[in-house]
Image: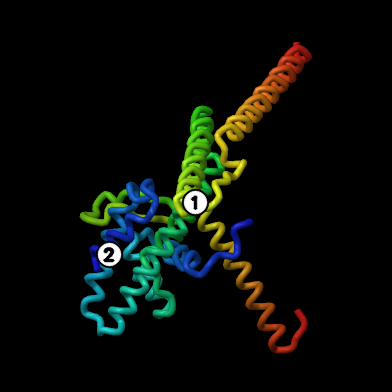
Amino acid sequence: MEQLPLTEPVLMVLLSLAEQPRHGYSIIKDVEHISEGRVVLSTGTLYGALLRLLDRGWIERFEEEDASRDRRAYRLTALGRRSLKQEFERMRHLTRLAGLRISGKKA
Amino acid sequence: MLYLYRFLLRLYPARLMEEYGEEMTAVLYKLHRGSRTDVFAARWRFELREVTGLLSGALREQIHERNRNLSGGTMRSFRFPRWTLVMMILIFCAVNTAIEKGRLASVQLSGGPASSHWWALPGVFMFVFALLAVAGLAGYGVLLVFRGARAGRGQ
């Protein structure tokens, strides 16, 4: 897929949505939590990432029925999940290769 | 600070603000409310991150929106009126001539030699304009002939 590799904010947003659909505020808090405070998204960065992902069709926006205030939420599409898996495979290959090269073994 | 956020949100393209403005404002309010309990340094870090995030986000989205329009969005249906081009040339000639006249008047008042730049003369402008118009008409005529010949071959 031509859009790989993903930037860190985009990857974190996808990982956050891979668990369950969320709205903007919830994504920011979840990303902060899963990265153990290392990645703190600003609202501008979050919506930049969300807009690009919506353009690519990796996520979709929907209206929650039972929510009182945050009516709009985001969820991963099948294409988004596939792309995330592809990125994960790429990273796993890189990590394995790096591990082998650093320890002095042949890949 | 909330006023600043609202102002910065206005820098985003209108289409996006219509769609996401309310949602982004709600997120900002929630984050802002949450940061009230933070220590001073953390609160400032938060404010700085949000302001720079909104500024860079607005710039990025404006560029993205422009590229989107140029690559087939609203620009495809946009037609530049021919008369606008003619009017722009005429206005450019008039402004240039007025500037040259003003320069000449100031030189004359200060007792200097009253020599005008040839390229700022209205007659030269009119000549160049007429030349361009003739060239344009000739080009249009050639295009019409070619189109007619292609249509004839097609039949």
Q: Residues within 10 Å of mark 2 (few under 14, many from 20)?
A: few
What residue do we see at 75% from left, 18% from top? B150
Side (left or right) of A81 relative to A21: right
- Does dot 2 land on a helix, a strand or a loop? helix
Task: Name the residue tied to disc 2.
Answer: B4
Residue drawn at the location 76% of the way across and 12% of the way down: B152
Chain letter of disc 1 in the image: B
How many marks overall? 2
Q: Mark 1 touching mark 2, by CB under 8 A?
A: no
Q: Residues within 10 Å of mark 1 (few under 14, many from 20)?
A: some
Question: Which one is in front, B26 or A87?
Answer: B26
Say which of B62 and A1 sits in front.
Answer: B62
Give the percent coordinates (x, y) of residue B107.
49, 51
Question: From the viewer's perspective, is residue B45 above or below residue B94?
Answer: below
Circle 2 marks a residue in which chain?
A: B
Q: Residue at x 34, y 79 (%)?
A: B45
Residue A7 is situated, as x and y percent measured from the top left of the image, at 53, 67
Q: Which mark is residue B107?
A: 1
Residue lying farthest bottom?
A103
Asked if badge 1 and badge 2 are on a common chain, one would say: yes
